[in-house]
Image: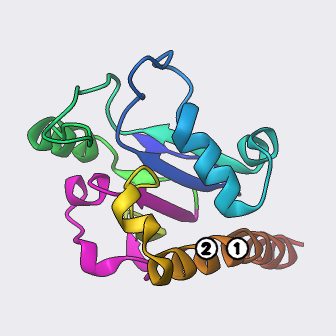
Amino acid sequence: MLLGEPGKLLIVGQAPEAGGDGLAPCTGFRGKRLAQLFGLSEEEMRRQVCLAHLLQRFPGRGDGRMDDFPAVEARMAAAQVQRFASFRVLLLGAVATAFGCGRSLQFVWFPLRGAQVAVVPDVADHNWWRDASNAAVGSKFFSELLLKVAAADRTKGANRG
């Protein structure tokens, strides 16, 4: 299975949110937070970025306020993705572990399944994003990201012509 769209940044989140429609990825809080980090409206973000769920259903709540993460089911879903169609891919939070990536790779680009991939803390992880130094690193990463994607697209277009 291919995941993403050529020429677009792909963001892979865990699953639909509780009470979400199950179809549109990153609705509710996550969508608003991602758009905010990019400095875009949600509508503009959805035009420029390809959003996907790794799992097709909300897994329920775990301990505390965070969602449960069915690791075995997630690894099986990740194994179905042989290649990413997008050149740049962000794996949000625990999704990275399903692809065999650890948290030590946060905000670092590395090759995986035909793409340049980075791990980003889940935008719903309030504890991580509340820390001022974490938020500064994350905000800088997101603000520069769409520029990198656009530059890569221009380079590919020039090489084709």
- Would residue 116 be found to the left or right of residue 35 on screen? left
Q: Quadrant of residue 42?
A: top right
Q: Secondary structure at mark 2?
A: helix
Q: Secondary structure at mark 1?
A: helix
x and y, in percent, of residue 54 in the image? 35, 39
- Would residue 10 be found to the left or right of residue 94 on screen? right
Q: Quadrant of residue 152?
A: bottom right
Quadrant (top left, top right, bottom left, bottom right) of the N terminus? top left
Give the residue furthest to the right: 161
* 156 lies above or below 91: below
- Would residue 36 be found to the left or right of residue 84 on screen? right
* 83 lies above or below 148: above
Q: Quadrant of residue 150?
A: bottom right
* Residue plotted at (41% across, 54% down): 83
Q: Kindly identify the amino acid type of the residue bearing the numbered disc 1.
A: Ser
Quadrant (top left, top right, bottom left, bottom right) of the C terminus? bottom right
- Would residue 122 be found to the left or right of residue 150 on screen? left
Q: Kindly identify the amino acid type of the residue bearing the numbered disc 2.
A: Ser
Range of the magenta residues?
A: 87-112
Q: Is residue 34 magenta?
A: no
Q: Are marks 1 and 2 in contact (CB under 8 Å)?
A: yes
x and y, in percent, of residue 119 in the image? 39, 68
* 131 lies above or below 33: below
Q: Which mark is residue 143?
A: 1
x and y, in percent, of residue 155 in the image? 79, 79
* Residue plotted at (31% across, 25% down): 58
* 71 lies above or below 22: below
Alpha carbon of mark 1 to alpha carbon of mark 2: how far? 6 Å
Q: Which mark is residue 139?
A: 2
